[in-house]
Amino acid sequence: MLYILVGDDAYAIKRRVQALMPTTAEQHCFEHTTPDDLERLLRLAESYSLRGQRSIWCRTPLLQKTVSAAVVEALQMAAQRDDTLLILSSESIDRRLKTTKALLPFATVETYPLLAEWDTRALAAQVTSLAQATGLTLDTRSRDQLVERVGNQTELLARELEKLWLWHHQTRQPVTPAIIERLVGMAAVSSIVLSKHLLARSLGSALDCLQALYAHNEPAEKIIRTLDTQYRTWTRTKALLDTNASHELIATTLKLGNPNRVYFLRRELQSVSLQRLERAQTAILAAEWSLKQGHPDALHTLVLALCA
């Protein structure tokens, strides 16, 4: 039996693996693709378990790289055996590879993507669902406060909900926005959040967010790339909105995938001019060049410029 779990929501994938793996089975987990690991995987796939059932979880990018024909054949055999549960998980799979083509016919494929940070409606639904599973009831304001604090980080959300449940269980008091503000840290720091602070010209919040990103060891180059991508999307969207283009045309032109995102973009850009976005893009490119020239304060200077 073979499951292929694809996506960047590591927490959701971990929960799914725990649900799939029988607790009585012999369990093995691989997190690397060194020659020794592949050799051990090969032996496991070709042998039988003394306990009758065996579960093998490969958290390695086997479906993103070429492996030997012997490994592929062994995995095919394992996937077809009733006594073996084989789980392959990866952020993405390359369907062009021989490995992937050989295994897909025997696999149940499930996807677990992280929700988009801009999709507040889906994030709110996720908070409500996990809160109910935890045994918590949140009103709309508390739910939205938690979305703002945690963002799309599913594992962090689960931990914070457990903390809130313990507080509720001990005090017998409802979980209010004030309680969430006190107990749940502002951990939803990302380059996307930084870009939104910059768009709103919220200098204090932008500087705090940048400092938090540095504290999380986020590379400056990655922050710049995300800002560039976000502002390119905003600039192209604003240009199309100014021509009264339809939401369907905007979604198609920008290859957004989800046309509903245009509604969020329109709301974000309602009071922002196209000229300001174009100037911001020029400043971002200049900051990227400055960073490559070895000026570590380039991002700080960029934040000051975009919030001016």
Image (cartoon, rainbow, N blue to C red):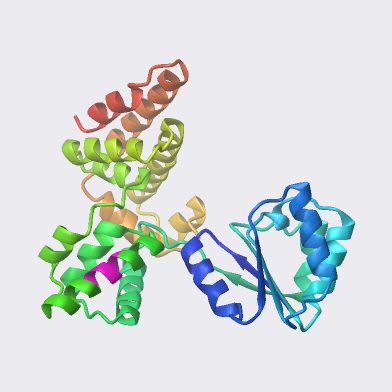
**In the figure, is residue 193 to the left or right of 271?**
right
Q: Which residues are magenta?
A: 160-164
Q: Determine if the magenta segment contains residue 220.
A: no
Q: Residue furthest front?
A: 50
Which corner quadrant of the image does residue 55 belong to?
A: bottom right
Q: Position of residue 208 (x, y in %)?
A: 22, 39
- Residue 9 in sight: no
Q: Position of residue 61 (x, y in %)?
A: 67, 54
**In the figure, is residue 201 to the left or right of 78?**
left
The structure residue drawn at horizontal position 36% and vertical position 48%, both measured from the top left corner, is: 243
Total number of numbered discs in the rendering? 0
Residue 162 in the image: above or below residue 226:
below
Quadrant showing the C terminus: top left
Closer to the camera, 75 or 28? 28
Which secondary structure type mostly characterizes the magenta part of the structure? helix
Quadrant showing the N terminus: bottom right
Residue 50 in the image: above or below residue 87:
below
Which corner quadrant of the image does residue 250 belong to?
A: bottom left
The structure residue drawn at horizontal position 39% and vertical position 65%, both measured from the top left corner, is: 260
Which corner quadrant of the image does residue 211 belong to?
A: top left
The structure residue drawn at horizontal position 25% and vertical position 57%, both measured from the top left corner, is: 149
The structure residue drawn at horizontal position 19% and vertical position 79%, both measured from the top left corner, is: 169
Q: Determine if the magenta segment contains residue 163.
A: yes
Closer to the camera, 215 or 127? 215
**In the figure, is residue 30 to the left or right of 186?**
right
Q: Position of residue 129 (x, y in %)?
A: 34, 78
Residue 259 in the image: above or below residue 250:
below
Q: Position of residue 49 (x, y in %)?
A: 77, 76
- Residue 81 in sight: yes
